[in-house]
Image: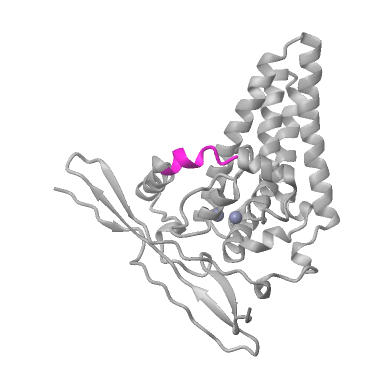
Amino acid sequence: MPSLAQHKYLPCFHRQVYTSRPILYRARVYCATTTTTNSSPAGKLVIEPRLVPTQPVVVTAYNRPLDNDPSLQSTWSHRAWVVAGCTTLLISLGGSIKGAADLHLWVEPIIASYIGYILSDLGSGIYHWGIDNYGDGTTPFVGSQIEAFQGHHKMPWTITRREFANNLHALARAVTFTVLPIDLVCHNPTVQAFVGMFAGCIMFSQQFHAWAHGTKSRLPALVVALQEAGVLVSRSQHGAHHRPPYNNNYCIVSGVWNEFLDKHKVFEAMEMILYFKLGVRPRSWSEPTSEWLEDIEIPSRVPTQ
Ligand SMILES: [Zn+2]
Ligand SMILES: [Zn+2]
């Protein structure tokens, strides 16, 4: 009877390594889980996750990047791509509204835009899962995004310091190249509504993502209200993505797909298919290495009350 037993994660271990500093200690926290995949007698794959209790993440003022870090600031190139992306979206959505008004056709474009919003969350999850798990900095077209997301897992808090155009320019460029040609050839208001809303949510997903890392007291009240209403991905839901086992809650627009995808182990099934078809292992199966570790700095002295 064929039997497959694959250790998706190494057994859990939690370790802290301290190096001395004048004022503080640097702690590196490792967390992992074990998942065993078996082939049942009927040939059906069974994935049994063994979850590790989540570890609290300590973020202090010490590990926050400098406000003037040039890698977090927007350049004129970043701003130009964001302007191009926004212009492309306005052509789609403006064309949809004009076409709907001319044809007195409103229901279909509204439904199409809602479907675009819902599917954009799924699209953001698939893309995020792909670049979190496959490829590296040398991968064509998305290498820089892969490096950026790996850096994000290492220092999640930096996204809240990243300037708007710096954060959005890569997706804005992708939207410009893919949607602008559609704008030029398609003048159907329903299609334009779907494309404009889908691409818009994808382009701004990095801003929604940044807000998901914000603290409630510092976020605009409207953003908090939209997060709590489930219109935008919530802080708690995305926070789970940054805790072991680091293989869930990939969707970053509204997060509406996260529960379904994780409950039905959709990404794990896709990982198995890719592994058996192509022999490539996702990063989330491996022992946490530098790209999954979060640098944490803890003050050497606890302030007295
Ligand atoms: Zn991620
Ligand atoms: Zn994040």
Q: Quadrant of residue 90?
A: top right
Is residue 302 among what the camera can see? Answer: yes
Task: Report the residue at 38% width, 53% height from top.
Answer: 279
Instruction: Decide whether residue 196 is among the magenta residues.
Output: no
- 73 horizontally vs 232: left or right: right
Work out which residue is located at the far front of the displayed protein and give it.
305
Task: Report the residue at 57% width, 72% height from top.
Answer: 295
Instruction: Decide whether residue 259 is among the magenta residues.
Output: yes
Q: In this orientation, which residue lies closer to the viewer: 134 or 92?
A: 92
Work out which residue is located at the far top of the displayed protein and give it.
104
Q: In this orientation, which residue lies closer to the viewer: 214 or 251?
A: 214
Work out which residue is located at the far left of the displayed protein and give it.
1
Task: Report the residue at 47% width, 78% height from top.
Answer: 16
- 296 horizontally vs 17: left or right: right
Q: Quadrant of residue 122?
A: top right
**Residue 256: x %, y % from top left:** 54, 37
Q: Which color scheme does this rendered protein use?
A: one colour
Residue 235 sits above or below residue 179 on the image: below
Q: In this orientation, which residue lies closer to the viewer: 282 or 263?
A: 263
* Region in magenta: 254-262
**Residue 105: x %, y % from top left:** 73, 11
- 104 horizontally vs 211: left or right: right
Is residue 173 among what the camera can see? Answer: no
- 213 horizontally vs 125: left or right: right
Point out the quarter of the image occupied by ligand 2.
bottom right
**Residue 288: x %, y % from top left:** 45, 66
